[in-house]
Amino acid sequence: MEYGYLGMIDYYRLPLNLWYWYRETLLGIKHPEPVKEGIPYAVRITADRTCIGTDGTEDAFIMVEILNQDGNRIANTMEVELEVVSGGAVFPTGKRFVLSPEKRNFYEGLGAIELRSYYAGENRITAKAEGLIMENLLSMQQERSGGRIKS
């Protein structure tokens, strides 16, 4: 089975090499150094925001990276499982989401997915890969009232 052609940005909002080429050609911004393979040590999980509304109109962009012992991203690709272990947050597929090269959603040690919540409160998300140190991410969802987050 062949999937659709990925252009400059992949389906999970990550820029691909073509995007960097256009940015360098048109804007003069140097292409970042290619990431090399190494010895995997840990998983890092980050989010573009740790506080989102619960009205279904916002999501958090969750990014996962494979790191070496020095804390630098490496290009190794392996299966990484994301799981909401507490709270009401969900990935598009539910409480669990798997990033893997076979699913074509994990490239050069980097993968991403969105997270949404319809209930206020704290959420804990774990990222784990076989043999690597796992990491947790805490996010806070707040109820909205009239388009504004209640304090």
Image (tube, grey):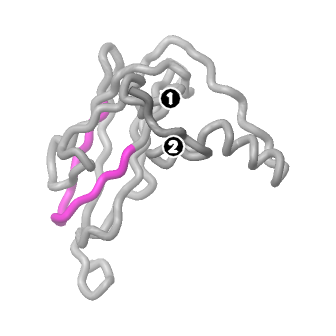
8 left or right of 32 in image: left
Disc 1 residue crowd, few under 14, some 14–19, many 20+, Cα 10 Å: some
Residue, far front: 1
Q: Earlier in the sequence, mark 2 or mark 1?
A: 2
Amino acid at the residue labelled 2: Asp
The spot of residue 125 in percent (x, y) is 26, 42
In what quadrant of the picture does the C terminus appear? Answer: bottom left
**Residue 95 forms part of the magenta stretch:** no
Q: Residues within 10 Å of mark 2 (few under 14, many from 20)?
A: some
- The magenta region covers 113-127
Rendered location of residue 28, percent (x, y): 84, 49
Residue 22 in the figure: left or right of residue 46: right
Kindly indicate whether the residue at mark 1 contacts the one at mark 2 (C-beta within 8 angstroms). yes
Q: Nearer the viewer, residue 97 or 127?
A: 97
Q: Give the residue drawn at x 15%, y 52%.
A: 87
Which type of secondary structure does the marked residue at label 2 adopt?
A: loop
Q: Nearer the viewer, residue 61 or 10?
A: 10
Name the residue beneath numbered marker 1.
107
Alpha-carbon distance for marks 2 and 1?
10 Å
The image shows a total of numbered marks equal to 2
Q: Nearer the viewer, mark 2 or mark 1?
A: 2
* Above or below, 32 relative to 66: below
Residue 57 in which image quadrant: bottom left
Assign the magenta stretch its main secondary structure: strand
| Element at label 1 | strand
- Left or right, residue 37 beside residue 151: right
Residue topped by disc 2: 10
- Hey, what amino acid is under mark 1? Tyr
Task: Give percent across and percent down for residue 52.
Answer: 32, 65
Note whether 109 is above or below 52 in the view shown: above
Q: Quadrant of residue 129?
A: top left
